[in-house]
Image (cartoon, helix red, strand yellow):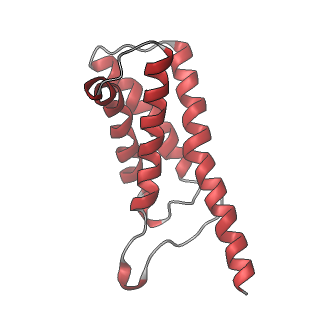
Amino acid sequence: MEQTNQRAPGGLVHGSPYLLLDLIAVLIFVAVGRDVHGHADDLRGLIKTSWPFAVGVVLGWLVTRQWRNPISWSAVIVWLVTVGIGMILRVVTDQGIAIPFIFVSLGFFALTQLGWRIVVGRWLRWHHRAAR
């Protein structure tokens, strides 16, 4: 992943669209998982299943200060915090976990949270070279 500065003039930060991508990854993960396991398509169930991972995303962003440079290697920490905190909160709230679920979560969030950063980083690098 490329180190890029996502700050706008005047110190405004452009991290929020990137945070949204990480949160969308959580919603996709949960929606697909609930569908595969035959759970009802209701908003309450989606929120109940999503919130532990969403908290993990937000904590990961806070720990790494990801908004300063969302296209960086610190995203690996965001990925691991998302899954780790998500699993801990699921256990604490009696939602349950299983070893295969942990591995599926690690794989899915690696593909999404790290994947979009790789794609955006390469695009930014290409765009920067093309602008020269």
Q: Position of residue 91 (x, y in %)?
A: 34, 17
Which quadrant of the structure image shows residue 55? Answer: top left
**Foreground: 119 or 80?**
119
Q: How many marks?
A: 0
Left or right of 55, for residue 123: right
**Which residue in the rendered view is the most extreme toward the front?**
41
Does 43 appear above or below 68? above
Identify the residue shown where x is 36% and y is 85%. 10
Q: Position of residue 106 (x, y in %)?
A: 56, 30
Rendered-image quadrant of the N terminus: bottom right
Which quadrant of the structure image shows residue 40? Answer: top left
**Foreground: 106 or 122?**
122
**Which residue in the rendered view is the most extreme toward the bottom?**
132
Identify the residue shown where x is 46% and y is 32%. 83
Left or right of 46, for residue 1: right
Left or right of 73, for residue 89: left
Identify the residue shown where x is 69% and y is 63%. 122
Q: Position of residue 82 (x, y in %)?
A: 44, 37
Left or right of 35, for residue 11: left
Which quadrant of the structure image shows residue 14? Answer: bottom left
Rendered-image quadrant of the C terminus: bottom right
Does 102 appear above or below 8? above
Does 40 appear above or below 65? above
Q: Position of residue 84 (x, y in %)?
A: 44, 31
